[in-house]
Image (spheres, helix red, strand yellow):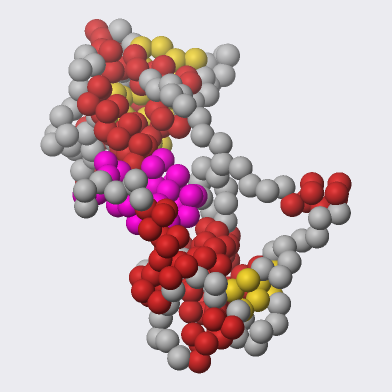
């Protein structure tokens, strides 16, 4: 597994370590606790800085905060002052038992206050034992942070939107698809586009003029295929041949995919050709708000500690 894909420790994996770091009974700030955990888990800079795409909230920091919130509900820790933590007698007693792991289930079974909170939080969210449409069950309401739930919902909606776009593209005619591709590239800021006349296209479906004088020209090939009809290396070679003398670069876009040989053929070829398959196409459409519109916007807010401290003297 590469360093860029190493997972960040889950909330329940962090719980025992968090409590152990408070074992001496001294007050510890949240920031200090996060720093100690980063060191203990030997997190890379990439893991430490990773954040939720939508909210920008730091993932590791958020998971530590979420574990703290569960400990507060179980009365294992307390907050003697803002942003500081301290273990309680209940927490000390638990560590004396030397548990191997602390989990949500463990807290439910051991601590009545936590069990009552858990029951109250999940009441009304149950769906007769079935998962919700998002694939989440009632316990996810309190075992996942709000940022994780928002991220999960956003990812689910994003994937659903791409599938619907792909379905919609199936109904577009080949000539309509060529126009769609040119319009999309214009929306992406490539320049002024035009669809070629079919009798004179020479294997090129359109052009994008990157400057007003037409000195930086990009040729376009737009192929509307079924999913199982992949683009071959021969088609890449033919497109490259059509580009020579007409455009310095080319973009080959398809509603299907490219064979391994086609991808290899596009590497190091002259003129340079960029390949965009069906998944990349709909991803670009969503990214550039092309063929989609904003349905609603959710705001995720947090306490502005700097403002409260600087203006009103509220301590960290």
Residue 103 visible to an observer of this rendering: no
**Residue 147 lies within the magenta run:** yes
In magenta stretch: residue 31: no
Q: Nearer the viewer, residue 203 or 72?
A: 72
Which residue is nearer to you in this view: 181 or 59?
59
Image quarter hosting the N terminus: bottom left
236 lies left or right of 307: left
Front residue of 238/98: it is 98
Query: For the point 25% across and 12% down, which residue is it?
Result: 175
Residue that sits furthest to the left in the current view: 228
Magenta-drawn segment: 130-155
Residue 242: x %, y % from top left: 31, 24
Q: Position of residue 30 (x, y in %)?
A: 66, 68
- Between residues 138 and 75, which one lies in front from this camera angle? 75
Point out the image quarter for the C terminus.
Answer: bottom right
Q: Is residue 119 above or below residue 278?
A: below
At 48% from the left edge and 74% from the top edge, which residue is drawn? 15
Q: Position of residue 158 (x, y in %)?
A: 37, 37
Is residue 224 toward the left or the right of residue 98 in the image? left
> How many labels, in total?
0
Q: What residue is at 51 percent from the left and 34 percent from the top?
A: 298
What's the residue at 38%, 58% (across, down)?
Answer: 119
Q: As displayed, is residue 189 above or below residue 310?
A: above
Q: Is residue 77 above or below residue 136?
A: below
Query: Residue 205: in sight, yes or no?
Result: yes
The spot of residue 180 in percent (x, y) is 35, 17
């Amino acid at each position: 597994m590469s360093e860029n894909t190493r997972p960040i420790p889950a909330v329940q994996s962090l719980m025992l370590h968090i409590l152990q770091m408070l074992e001496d009974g001294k007050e510890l700030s949240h920031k200090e606790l996060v720093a100690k955990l980063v060191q203990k888990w030997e997190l890379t800079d990439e893991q430490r800085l990773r954040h939720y795409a939508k909210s920008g909230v730091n993932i590791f920091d958020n998971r530590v905060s979420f574990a703290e919130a569960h400990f507060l509900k179980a009365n294992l820790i307390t907050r003697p002052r803002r942003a500081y933590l301290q273990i309680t007698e209940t927490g000390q007693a638990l560590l004396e038992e030397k548990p191997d792991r602390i989990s949500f289930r463990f807290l439910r079974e051991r601590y009545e206050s936590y069990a009552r909170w858990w029951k109250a939080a999940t009441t009304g969210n149950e769906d007769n034992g079935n998962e919700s449409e998002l694939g989440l069950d009632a316990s996810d309401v309190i075992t996942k942070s709000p940022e994780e739930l928002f991220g999960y919902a956003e990812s689910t909606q994003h994937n659903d939107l791409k599938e619907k776009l792909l379905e919609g593209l199936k109904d577009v005619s080949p000539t309509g698809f060529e126009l769609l591709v040119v319009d999309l590239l214009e929306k992406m800021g490539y320049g002024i586009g035009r669809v070629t006349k079919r009798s004179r296209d020479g294997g090129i479906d359109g052009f994008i003029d990157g400057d007003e004088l037409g000195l930086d020209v990009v040729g376009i090939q737009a192929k509307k295929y079924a999913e199982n009809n992949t683009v071959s290396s021969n088609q890449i070679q033919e497109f490259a041949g059509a580009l020579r003398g007409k455009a310095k670069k080319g973009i080959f876009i398809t509603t299907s995919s490219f064979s391994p040989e086609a991808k290899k053929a596009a590497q190091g070829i002259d003129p340079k050709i960029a390949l965009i398959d069906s998944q990349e196409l709909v991803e670009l459409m969503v990214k550039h708000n092309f063929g989609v519109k904003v349905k609603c916007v959710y705001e995720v807010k947090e306490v502005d500690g700097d403002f409260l401290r600087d203006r009103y003297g509220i301590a960290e």
